[in-house]
Amino acid sequence: KIQLMVKLRPFYWGFYATRIYLPFSSLARSFKRQRRNLLQRGGNFLQMTSLPAVGWKSVTRSRSVHLMESAKSNGNVRISELGILAHLAKDCPEGSNIFEIGTFDGRTTLNLALNSPPACRVYTLDLPSGTDTKYDIESGEEHFVNKKNHRRPVC
């Protein structure tokens, strides 16, 4: 029974990320936006963009994804974003490549590899700690770049 639960856990997290968490977080943002308008509070709490909006379901096929290491730490993408990236990886053509910039702790990389076709290769780029950058790194974000105690993915 426990083995079955362990096998089903990645499927559960994939379902939860895109079928439960994502719709409810979108609904919560909508309620928050309406509440702010009713209270006539100025300012936007969402970043405005001029990019066209495209629903992720319109660019991916509907099927299940599996998510490993679903726990989020500071610096990781949200589980809903991880689920969408897994859906996109699942739709990659056999023999294609995925390139991730900014590996952090390897959580996204692991899930891209888990959901992509077997002949699809996943490459990542993460600058070594202490690398000089063209632009200053904000003091509150230095720990994302100068990682000393994060586990590294084994490939």
Image (spheres, rainbow, N blue to C red):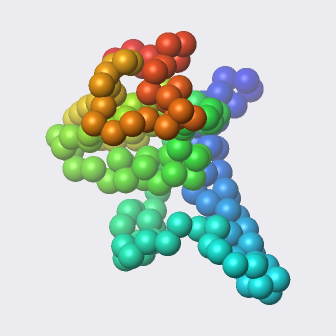
Left or right of 65 in this view: 88: left
Left or right of 131 in this view: 150: right
Q: Nearer the viewer, residue 113 or 142?
A: 142
Position of residue 120 relative to residue 32, above or below, is above
Left or right of 36 in this view: 96: left
Q: Quadrant of residue 72?
A: top right
Residue found at x 73% / y 24%: 2
x, y percent for residue 123: 26, 32
Residue found at x 52% / y 17%: 150
Residue found at x 22% / y 50%: 93
x, y percent for residue 80: 57, 52
Position of residue 17 relative to residue 43, above or below, is above
Position of the N terminus, as image quadrant, is: top right
Q: In the displayed image of the protein, which residue is found farthest to the left? A: 95
Residue 109 visible in the picture: no
Position of residue 74 relative to residue 47, above or below, is above
Position of residue 114 relative to residue 55, above or below, is above
Q: How many marks?
A: 0
Q: Quadrant of residue 36?
A: bottom right
Residue found at x 62% / y 43%: 13
Q: Nearer the viewer, residue 17 or 54?
A: 54
